[in-house]
Image (tube, helix red, strand yellow):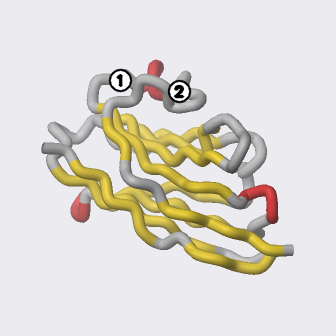
Amino acid sequence: QVQLVESGGGSVQAGGSLSLSCAASGLPGSSNCMGWFRQAPGKERERVAIIYTDGADTYYADSVKGRFTISQDNAKNTVYLQMNSLKPEDTAMYYCAADPRLTLRACRSVVAGTGLLYWGQGTQVTVSS
């Protein structure tokens, strides 16, 4: 049984930083497409950052490039999202997702996360101005 458990959300003032963690268990093999997605009230879910765990290729939404960093610790089966220079528009529920079926090419094409196999429960990030 695959489980993704997010942690690290919270409230911060604009310009601040937060670090999210996604601890994965039960994923088969070492080649997984994993990522962070977010959804704000009244808005569609969007991709924040993606990492392909076999090789650590990473991809970011334009809105977070240069501010957010996705990384992995294979020994701990954990993916992280370091968020710096946070803005009020980063406020959303952040979800971790994973899919062992995707190739690197398919992983790069993931946009809103539709169809990804496994999801965490989400962690709230609130950035105040």
Taking 36 as reference, is 125 left or right? right
Which residue of the protein is positioned furthest toward the right in this rendering? 129
Q: Which mark is residue 102?
A: 1
Callout 2: 10 Å neighbours few (<14), some, many (20+)? some
Taking 41 as reference, is 19 left or right? left
Q: Position of residue 42 (x, y in %)?
A: 72, 42
Q: Which mark is residue 110?
A: 2
The disc labelled 1 sits on which kind of residue?
Answer: Leu
Q: Earlier in the sequence, mark 2 or mark 1?
A: 1
| Element type where label 1 sits in the image | loop
Q: Are marks 2 and 1 in contact (CB under 8 Å)?
A: yes
Q: Position of residue 22 (x, y in %)?
A: 38, 59
Callout 1: 10 Å neighbours few (<14), some, many (20+)? some
* Nearest the eye: 42 or 50: 42
Relative vertical location of residue 52 with respect to residue 18 in this rendering, above or below: above
| Element type where label 2 sits in the image | loop
The residue shown at (50%, 31%) is 113
Choose top left, top right, bottom left or bottom right for residue 11: bottom right
